[in-house]
Image: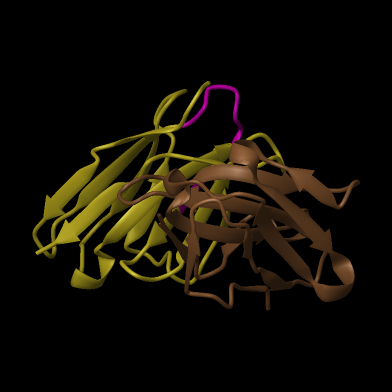
Chain colours: A brown, B yellow
Amino acid sequence: AQSVTQPDIHITVSEGASLELRCNYSYGATPYLFWYVQSPGQGLQLLLKYFSGDTLVQGIKGFEAEFKRSQSSFNLRKPSVHWSDAAEYFCAVGAKEYGNKLVFGAGTILRVKS
Amino acid sequence: EPEVTQTPSHQVTQMGQEVILRCVPISNHLYFYWYRQILGQKVEFLVSFYNNEISEKSEIFDDQFSVERPDGSNFTLKIRSTKLEDSAMYFCASSVDNQPQHFGDGTRLSIL
């Protein structure tokens, strides 16, 4: 069965520090990979996506993610975190073979301390 | 930038009542989805819809649930007889084929 694991429930970083949020997946098909961000009471905003090609993808708000097939990982990174980045981050995986439905990880709550 | 819109933002309903959640997908999108997020839990897939029919549904999407695209713009989720455990945030999403799904801001459904 398809599954997505985000091992860190909460992460706290200082403003200006670098950030890495981990995502591992188990999928029986060639996956599409996404990161979404959700601020409290808000919807899910797409940060970035990976379909094919270059394994390092750039997204909005200065985020990037790297797809590592050998590790079944798609970790999200940002070199310098801003207080406004505090939110919950979801990794999601889909595949055309599975009808494009997305399977989400449990999310990682990011806290930024000044 | 076009967006998916959902109404209402918050719906409070008595247990056993019917509820309809409404969504207006992005206009040139062809694939439509409903997901839900119970408080503190993962976002879960409910159903996908394409070409005026359900293309896939999860085990959550039982006979109490139905979806409809009544006209060219709206996409609705109906829960026929709500239960307490239906309380959740419901998200509508739309996409063009296998492109990223764009999500609405959600409807918070509270069952009393």
Q: Residue at x 49, y 59 (%)?
A: A14
Q: Which residue is drawn at 78% across and 46% down?
A: A57
Side of B19 where A42 appears, left or right: right
- Res A27 quadrant in image: bottom right
Side of B72 where A34 appears, left or right: right
Q: Quadrant of the N terminus of chain A?
A: bottom right
Residue B32 counted in the magenta span: yes
Give coordinates of residue B61: x percent, y percent: 43, 64
Residue A6 or residue B108, whichever sits in front: A6
Image: B1 above or below A74: above
Judge whether residue A31 can be spotted in this image.
yes
Image: A104 above or below A61: below
Q: Quadrant of the C terminus of chain A?
A: bottom left
Q: Residue at x 32, y 55 (%)?
A: B89
Side of A103 where B84 appears, left or right: left
- Res B10 quadrant in image: top left
Image: A48 above or below B71: below
Which SS does the magenta portion mostly show?
A: loop
- Res A6 quadrant in image: bottom right
Residue B102 counted in the magenta span: no
Residue A48 or residue A27, whichever sits in front: A48
Give coordinates of residue A93: x percent, y percent: 67, 60
Give coordinates of residue B77: x percent, y percent: 36, 47
Give coordinates of residue A22: x percent, y percent: 65, 69
Judge whether residue B32 can be spotted in this image.
no
Q: Residue at x 19, y 70 (%)?
A: B84
Q: What stretch is highlighted in magenta?
A: B25-34
Residue A92 or residue B110, whichever sits in front: A92
